[in-house]
Amino acid sequence: MSVSDAPPSTVVFTKPLDVVQYLKGTWKRCMEEKDFGGCFQFRRTNNIVIVISAEVSEDAGVEVLRWDIAHPGKKDELTHMYNMTIKTITDKEAAISYTYQDMPCQGRFISGPNALLLTHIDSAQCTAVVSITYRILDDNTMAVVVAECDSKGPSRLLTGIMHRVEIADYPQT
């Protein structure tokens, strides 16, 4: 199947901030990691649980989401990733801002293709760039592509999927 044959998203947002309600919940992200370049050599797979919850926003028209991660089987050991601020730009687009590893980051949600585009740039040293795309496929599924370019280490390409899950499905080990 080619990209043009891919089915359209079944989720329709009437305004950009509707994506906030969609994102809230517990997700399992399953990714395959490859070298980014050459023969795209397979490196490994990884699975993590991502818990996205709403935070209080002091500004009208602005939503804040808290992203925490845990490895499957360790649901009580959440690690905070970032707080994501989402603000409407137009009736079809929202601006996204957050801080990741002390780097200010930005992105966009575009309602036409139902995609979140996020970018991390190591602006202090200009040594790394990370681009993440989340494409909403249906009520409980997102496709994910992460491209990491790093001058200090290997560059990586990760592709995978995120499924909405119940945290109770992951017993503590």
Image: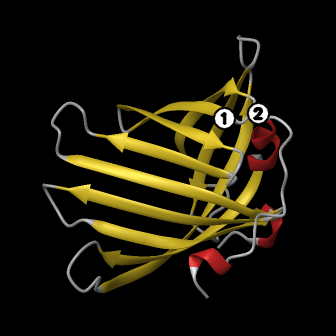
In the picture, residue 149 is in which quadrant?
bottom left
In the picture, residue 153 is in which quadrant?
bottom left
Q: Which residue is mark 1?
A: 93
Residue 42: x, y in percent? Answer: 34, 86
Q: CA distance from mark 1 to mark 2?
A: 9 Å
Q: Circle 2 sits in a helix, a strand or a loop, which is it? A: loop
Q: Is residue 100 visible?
A: yes
Q: Amino acid at mark 2?
A: Leu
**Mark in the foreground, 1 or 2:** 1
What scheme was used to colour the molecule?
secondary structure
Locate the C terminus and report the quarter of the image it occupies: bottom right
Q: Which residue is mark 2?
A: 17
Locate the N terminus and report the quarter of the image it occupies: bottom right
Residue 8: x, y in percent? Answer: 75, 67
Q: From the viewer's perspective, is residue 81 above or below residue 4?
A: above
For the image, the number of numbered tags is 2
Mark 2 crowd level (few <14, some 14–19, many ≥20, 10 Å Cα): many
